[in-house]
Image: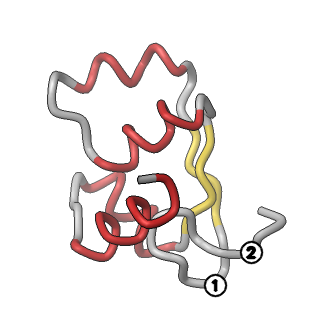
Amino acid sequence: MLAGSCELCGQTAKIQVHQIRRLADLDRLGQTQPDWAVLMAKKRRKTLMVCPPCHEGIHEGHETAVHEHHWRARCG
């Protein structure tokens, strides 16, 4: 949150927190995990700071090229 930008796409709009109950819950998503889940597991954090469009995409199950490009550039 201190960085003030979305951890998935880098947008600096109003930042929200996406949270899961436990890191072990990421394993329940199946063998192929979405990029946001891989990022959370890699950082060993239960939260991600995301912009509203990315947060909505997480909950609706959408992935975009913007997500892929940005997080790989930051953590790749």
**Cα distance, mark 1 to mark 2?**
6 Å
| Residue 60 disc label | none
What colouring method underlies this structural image? secondary structure
Q: Earlier in the sequence, mark 1 or mark 2?
A: 2
Looking at the image, residue 30 sits to the left or right of residue 21; the answer is left
Give the secondary structure at mark 2. Answer: loop
Residue 61 locus on image (x, y percent) = 23, 52
Give the secondary structure at mark 1. Answer: loop
Could you tell me if the residues under marks 1 and 2 are in contact, i.e. CB atoms within 8 Å? Answer: yes
* Residue pointed to by mark 2: 4
Tell me which amino acid carries mark 2. Answer: Gly
**The N terminus lies in quadrant:** bottom right
Residue at 55%, 19% in the rendered image: 22
Residue 73 locus on image (x, y percent) = 43, 66
Q: Residue furthest right?
A: 2
Residue at 51%, 62% in the rendered image: 74
* Residue pointed to by mark 1: 12
The image shows residue 43, relative to residue 22, as above or below, that is below
Asked whether 46 or 68 is in front, the reply is 68
The image shows residue 16, relative to residue 36, as above or below, that is below
Residue 6 locus on image (x, y percent) = 57, 70
Residue at 52%, 21% in the rendered image: 23
The quadrant holding residue 33 is top left
Q: Residue furthest top?
A: 24
Tell me which amino acid carries mark 1. Answer: Thr
